[in-house]
Image (spheres, rainbow, N blue to C red):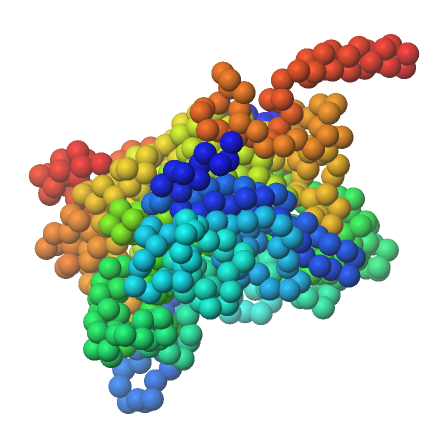
Amino acid sequence: MIQPGQILSGSNQGPSGQPLLEARHLRKDFPLRQMNIIGAGKVVQAVEDLSLNLFAGRATALVGESGSGKTTVARMLAGIHIPTRGELLFAQQPVNVKSMRERKKYLRQVQYIFQDPFSSLNPLRSVRYHLSRPLRMQGHARNSREVEAQALVLLEKVSLTPARQFLDKYPHQLSGGQRQRVSIARALAVRPSVLLADEPVSMLDVSIRLDILNLLLKLKEEEGLAFLFITHDIASARYFAEETQVMYAGQMVEGGPSDEVIRRPRHPYTRLLRAAAPDPDRMAQNMGDEVTGDVPERGEPPSLVNPPKGCRFHLRCPHAMEICRQSFPARTDFGGGHWANCHLYSSNLDVQTTRATTGG
Amino acid sequence: MVQSVHSNLDVLLDVQHISVVYDSPDGEVYAVNDVSFTLRRGEILGLAGESGSGKSTLAYAISRLLRSPARVTGGRVLYYPRTRETVYSTSLPSAGEEYKDVLSMTRKELRIFRWSELAVVFQSAMNALNPVATIQAQIMDVLRVHRPGLSRDQRHARAAELLKLVGITPERLKSYPHELSGGMRQRAVIAIALALSPEIIIMDEPTTALDVVIQRDILTEVMRLRQQLGFAVIFITHDLSLLLEMADEVIIMYAGRMVEKASRKALRQHALHPYTDGLLHTFPTLEGPIVRMTGIPGTPPDLRMVPSGCVFHPRCKKAWGKCSTVRPVLLPSPAGVGSAGQQVACHLYTGTGRDEELRASEIVFRKQGGEA
């Protein structure tokens, strides 16, 4: 059982064994519809080069602003989008998501939790129906008696109790938090080993967010599920996930153990995310100064149809150098699994490195 | 007691005993119950609470934006203008009066009061803007109606000035809402609210649908504009962590009632109400050990069937005998507890009786335990 006040373990331990789900160098381009047939087709370069590993009983958080490509990543992992390049491995076996049969097999293991519980449930159908579909389609339940018995267990598991009372409710009779629990129960009905949670709490009230996060933590720890946790709130990434990877405009910019990445961010973009997060300890007087200086004040992710060359963050970066406009930086390792793709830390630029490390 | 506050020139809005009900087929639903507070010039007042706590209903009652089935059943909202003879508000308030009750304003007076004196920034910037009109048209429209003296060129210049004020280049005047990003749309909505230089701006969850970075931009902008223009803000949000950073005073609402009012600092140091304390422990932190948090057990009550006594008692870890029967009233915190000016509605602080009762219940408990 989860004890209140218990210090979360796991974040310091490295992953044990092989990853359950592995993404290697995924790339996704979305073609744009065009009038001009002869010209070269324009594409939205949504995700450039993404690799990540999901382990049983552990979570990897994918952090970034809207438009950073994090949802595209989740959808590639869920087999909704076919990657333009790169490969997916489940339990060390390559997955061919183009094959209907393999995809079906794969989706038995990998399930998706959507962001908006108001639009991810069918308003005309009861909770019982939502849970019965996956149970029957996956052959876990053969008749309505089995459906009911298993649906009750699922509802208990997501703490919708008394379960029987919820079975015949419709989405409009449920609160946002309760709906999100139903959609989690629906994902669990498939009996997956990996859950892809796309901003599962950002549509909910602050007080309900914690309940849902704790429910997901329980599933992670007690059921040993592997999680991809997508969020723009780095504080909840630190709370929920052992690993964090930061994305900007389709590029991976930093990653490593969550606590390390969030408390000692190296990449200027991660620093911006950190400075932007609400922090009750910060006094209002400093609010203006805090965001200037080392951290860029404002700006928005660039268009991904013609993304900037080199590091895509250079347009907003206070430390941008000539080389940032030319080439995407190689990965720098800081030890302990913490890495960043930033020219400030490239070994041939020692002067800049000192400047950046003292700046934070 | 309240009268002495009136002479204070600082007071901009004095809200007294506001109650709002929603008429429903099953009877009246009490959405806001007897809420009183004052808003001072240039102050940022935070209204925090979960969905359904009545924070938006309260704000709309103050701005007279409620429509049937909502009904204000009591109270006064006294507005104290800075000077009585501004060019446009000669009728506000009438001669000899220091204040005007917003709830008894005529339609004509309301028309002047709203936007010129009090503006509202709604939650969803996409819905607040007209999708088929340019930003320029929407700002100039406000000026055309409320400042008929201005020429077209003057209106255009003012529109450009307003956009610049919120950090958007005036070239964007010709843009339609869908051509702007979420953050820019919210800035445009703020620019429109500022069009007539109001004294009060009500912001209803202005950043809830936005990303953290854009949220930070907007909040910094609001703080800067307040410094520059001196308006007061009523800031509604469910995210208490934002208010702890920016609000001067914070009101915590629960099930249509004020349960605590305190300065930002006091809340941070010693929140008195168990509900406030719970809210303070619902958001993960950026520093320190990662500790499993519990939040507040249970869900807010259905307002058609509020619990007896303290409305929070079914979810309260510190509830004792009296809590389920006697409704606590909002009182200044007793000497030695909390900060000056801090108010709380909780039996933990009403002094006498609690310790005796606890001891008595313990004895009863032991007796029962012994028999069983």
Residue at 12 percent across and 52 percent down: it is A321
The quarter of the picture where residue B86 lies is bottom left
Q: Residue furthest front?
A: B96
Q: Is residue A342 left or right of residue B270?
A: left
Residue A151 visible? The answer is no
Q: Is residue A37 left or right of residue B29?
A: left
Q: Quadrant of the C terminus of chain B?
A: top right
Q: Residue furthest right?
A: B371
Q: Is residue B338 left or right of residue B139?
A: right
Residue B10 placement (x, y as % from top left): 36, 41
Identify whether B94 is placed above or below A286.
below
Residue B4 visible? The answer is yes
Residue A166 placement (x, y as % from top left): 76, 52
Residue at 43 percent across and 62 percent down: it is B114
Identify whether B362 is placed above or below A249.
above
Residue A79 placement (x, y as % from top left): 52, 63
The quarter of the picture where residue B359 lies is top right
